[in-house]
Structure formats: structure tokens, C-alpha cells
Amino acid sequence: MATKPEILWAQRSSEYEPEKNIVYLTISVPELAPDYKLELTPSSISFSGHTTPPAQAGTASAVEPKSYEFKLDFFAEVEEVRRTLSGKSLFLLLKKKEASEDYWPRLTKDKVKLNFVKTDFSKWKDQDEQEDDEEPEDPGFGGAGGAGGMDMASMMGGMGGMGGMGGPGGAGGMDFEKMMEQMKGMPGMGGLGGDGDEAAPEEEDSDDDGPPPLEEA
């Protein structure tokens, strides 16, 4: 007697991107024989098949083949995109024919409890979390904190024209003092000063703050 296999499903939805308006459907039948029968229409799916346990060398297989079958009516129309048969299951990728931002409330047309139909939590995302499928692009260094919002590309471009910077191989002959003075004038480089102490040059005028000279008697 045929039994119903476990059916796992998940979905995505999109009104403007058909490739994201899809249903993931997994028919969990380990060691499914390649001669299974699958009839997929826009509104339904029917399946029948049996297992073929791998026989061990020199011994008869102790596992009896099992037969599976089921039929479902979909909540709305679909079309097949691709299918993949593995040693654990038969996977189907289906595209929803109706483009909509809204999720299906269930896989099946009728609102009934089917114990063999379950949510595939390994693929499921809530409707408001679908954007998480794509990782954001690396923002790079432009406008990054820690450098006062300076444009690193522009800075390096300006340094490329300084004396001693022509050609690879280090800073041969480069005037570091001149380079640092030019970099201090760039936007966002006000805090650049080697040790971070800009008060050092003022020490030259420190004589003004000392005690007055002694008058002659």
C-alpha cells in the first residue's frame, strides 16, 4: 500500500521580478527510483514512485522497497522551472503565474490540515524579510568614519603627483615634511599630525610666558 511522502515547501513573492515569485517544493523520498511518475499541471501536482535501497555487496537488502503517492491542488497556478533528483528527495522549483507581493496563505487550494505537508524552515523567509536574500554591497572606504569623511581616492590621486612618488619601489627622495603640510590642508585632515599633538609649534613663543627680566640695580 502506497503512503504519502513528506512534502516540504517555502515561497517568495514579487510583483515585478518573476524569478523571485516562486515556490520551493521538496518531496522527501530517500533513494527514489528514477522511474517515478510526476504529473504537474498549472493547478495541481500528482506523484507516485518507489524507493530502491542500495543492495550491499554479497548480501540481500533487508529494507523492503516502499511505494509513495499523493495529489495536491495548488492555491494558485504555477509552472515548473526545474527539478532535481537526489538520494534524499525530489526538489521542484515552481514559478507562480500571478505576480504579486503577497504571499500565498497556504500551499493548497482548500483550507485543510494535511499532516504530510510541512513548512521548509531551511528555505522559508517571512514576507517582510525577503530583501535579506541579497547581501548589501561593500560600501568601501568612501565616506567611512575615522578619516573625517575624507575621500581616500582623491587623496591618493593628489599624492600621485608629488615629487618622489613617481614609480613603484617606496618613497625614494620624497619630502615627507612637504607632503604632510599639503595633506594638512586637505578637507578632513585637520587631525593629521604624526603624534596627534598640534600644540608643539607654539613652544617657540613660550618665552613670552616666562618671568620678566631682572632690572639692573
Image (cartoon, grey):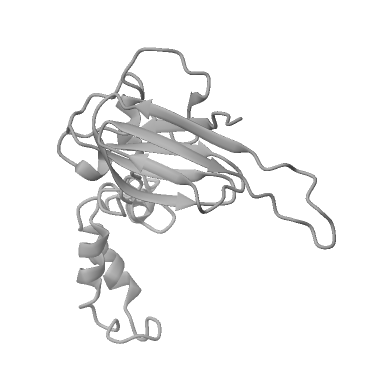
Position of residue 204 relative to residue 2, above or below, is below
Q: Position of residue 44 (x, y in %)?
A: 32, 31
Q: State the residue lying farthest toward the left.
A: 16
Horizontal side of 95 relative to 199 (left or right) equals left
Q: Position of residue 72 (x, y in %)?
A: 38, 27
- Residue positioned 40% across, 46% down in the render: 214
Res 32 seen here: yes
Res 210 seen here: no
Q: Nearer the viewer, residue 166 or 50?
A: 50
Horizontal side of 123 relative to 4 (left or right) equals left
* The N terminus: image quadrant: top right
Q: State the residue lying farthest toward the top.
A: 112
Q: State the residue lying farthest toward the front.
A: 1
Position of residue 48 relative to residue 191, above or below, is above
- Residue positioned 25% across, 45% down in the render: 19
Instruction: Report which quarter residue 91 is drawn in.
Output: top left
